[in-house]
Amino acid sequence: MRIRIIITLLIISMRLIGFNVTARVVNVDGKPIENVIITVNNRAVISRGNGLFKIEDVSAEDEIIFHKITYKDKRISAGDIKESIVLEKEIISIQGLRVIEQRKKELIGSSEIIIIKSKHNTGSAADILRENTDLQISGIPLTGEEQKIIFPGYKARHTLIMLDGIPLNKSGTAFDISTIPAEIIESIEIVKGSSSSIGGAGSMGGIININTKRANNNCKVNANHSFGSFGLDKHSLTLSAANSKVQFYSFVRKSFARNDFKYVPADDPDTLRTRDYNDKLIYDANINLSYSGSIGMLSYKFFFQDFFKKLPGNIESLEWFKDSRLTGQSQKHIINYSGKLEDYRIKADLFYSLDKSLYDNTRLDSLLLNNIYLAILARNRQQSRGIKLHSEYMSDVFYVDWGGDYRYEDFKYTDLNYPDQSIEKVYRNNYAVFGKTQLKQKHFPYTTSLTGSVRWDNTTGFNDHTSWKVEPEFSYENYFKIFLGGNVANGYTLPSYYSLFWKGDTHVSGNPDLKPESSLSWQIFSKLELLDNSFKVTYRHDDIDDMIIWIRDEWKKWKPMNLSSAEVENWDFELNLKPYKFLEFGTVYTKSSAINRSKNDPNYGSKIIYVPDYSLDIHARLKSGMFTGNVSYKLIGEQWSNSEQTTTGHQLPAYDLLNAGIEYSISWKEFEFTPAIRVNNILNKLYEIYDHIPQPGINWEVNLGIEWKL
């Protein structure tokens, strides 16, 4: 009996003895949650930026309460606390305002995702990416000019552009990302690395996924007017409204620019000439309507653009394209549904797009008007439609997404002057099934994860293709975090309609025997995080086979051929610092090597054209109260414009750019005024990123914005 009494007293005394609790608070994705209020016995602590907290002198039976707005409260005994406390999101309604959980990343399955939150009130997706990334953007950085994203060592056609998870690229072609207005963009996700197992064909270089805005308050009206260099004049109006069930977002914009900048002609470098016949007039419109209820979330999105663009062409052959122009319309319809069935989330996406344009080059001088290959009046028409069905399951350690999609695409080219040059309607059907899974184990302070994705595609006219990607990652977290990871993947890109079916002439023609391009890619990275500061090193290696290039055959005729193989290597060094709450600083240095490995090519061992040897991107952002200022500096290294590299005559020199902008917000009652000014190419550098395609010197834009909250 005495022994039992002693044991009982010992147990009671152990329960009464206080101990310390150290853990961290995370969301269902394992991301730390800061500023969580943690209370016990009339005491409270708050979680830090990395989610860590410490409570001293508690007993095992004390109840600890975790509270943060938009998360469900959690109560747990101190003795039951493990390394991590997981809080779930909660939907709440406050006088018509609906706070919902942040949309899950559509591209889950890649440890290399970079997310850019957009705060732009004017411009395009190209401007957002130019200011916030080190990615190379081809084209002239002015309103209405075609601009495309290029991952180092690849072509623009190897970048897949997605809008809310829906691919925008037509088969084998690059997408003009400047056609997506900045006003409708909520965020942009960037995946560096071959990702065909996630997005399908066309993502050998990487993926850009653009997430569009939705209404987030009762009612709001935004009006913006922009003016600037080279005749720039833009007007836009945005209306958004929401209650607990319905959200409405609409946007319209008119943009005009002459783009008549000065450039240095190659035949007379001591003079300046004007880039004439370069007017651009564009109308944009967007509607986003969604409903949330017991059935789930249903949304409809509509995107429309009407454009008139003059295309002066290469400055070496201006007379060949005198006053040429492109007019047309583009429309996109997307329907999304998301519903929950027990532990599964069911998703369905339907989309339809139609692009029509008319190219007119009939304003030539009389001596050139009879040239069948110059005096072109032709219509282009491309249509695509499809559906994607998939299901998600997610727990603390396991995520799986599986489903399938179907896509139909057709193309027609009609030459109104010379009907024999027309291309009758050709089409493609694509059927695909896919699966993505992630296994994550947390043993605080260690976390390991393994992500895998696979996709099988069946496309009209081509062999079936299976894409895959494997991504391991390890992290250690204390007062700092260390990440080690990488991936290995394959990818492919289908030939475009033009490269396959272009009828051409005695000098140029398409090649219906083209095979898809393919690649094998692997990369590793290491990242160190300390509070809001980080340093990351990434190495990427790609082997590309059957790259499509244009060469002259035995009859001296230009044709696209699967003759090229390439080896691409990239080193990225990225540093981000936040020494003060109001100041951010970041820099990325990339060293690239892209070598021709085609054994039957006389240029074997030469560098791939238009791949800079290096690039340096430095940016700083200052935010204090209602004032925001930013400055960026870019240095782009030398790049070759020709495969014959025996002399430096075909090497474009390095160039650097300095850009800066300021913005100030003024609040008055329900109104907020936001004047902003941005100056690009402050150093007034005259340079080229492609042979004979000049870039503008110093230019500026002023934006006057007003927001009215009803």
Image (cartoon, helix red, strand yellow):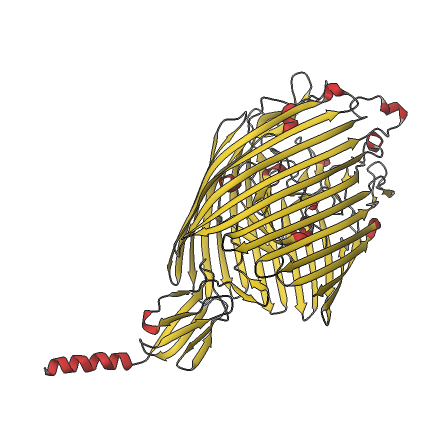
Please determine whether, in this image, residue 655 is positioned above or below residue 418.
below
Q: Which of the pair 19/534 is nearer the observer?
A: 19
x%, y% of residue 410? Answer: 62, 30
Considering every residue shown, the one lying at the far left of the view is 1
Quarter of the image with the N terminus in it: bottom left
The image shows a total of numbered marks equal to 0
Choose top left, top right, bottom left or bottom right for residue 26.
bottom left
Residue depicted at 56% across the width and 41% down the height? 350
Whether residue 79 is visible here, answered yes or no, is yes
Please determine whether, in this image, residue 702 is positioned above or below residue 563.
below
x%, y% of residue 244? Answer: 57, 61
Quarter of the image with the C terminus in it: bottom right
Considering every residue shown, the one lying at the far front of the view is 294
Q: Which of the pair 591/506 is nearer the observer?
A: 506
Q: Which of the pair 542/16 is nearer the observer?
A: 16
Considering every residue shown, the one lying at the far top of the view is 555
Considering every residue shown, the one lying at the far right of the view is 366
x%, y% of residue 505? Answer: 72, 19
Whether residue 391 sits left or right of residue 286 in the image: it is: left
Please determine whether, in this image, residue 50 is positioned above or below residue 498.
below
x%, y% of residue 556? Answer: 69, 18
Whether residue 468 is visible here, answered yes or no, is no
Residue depicted at 43% across the width and 77% down the height? 39
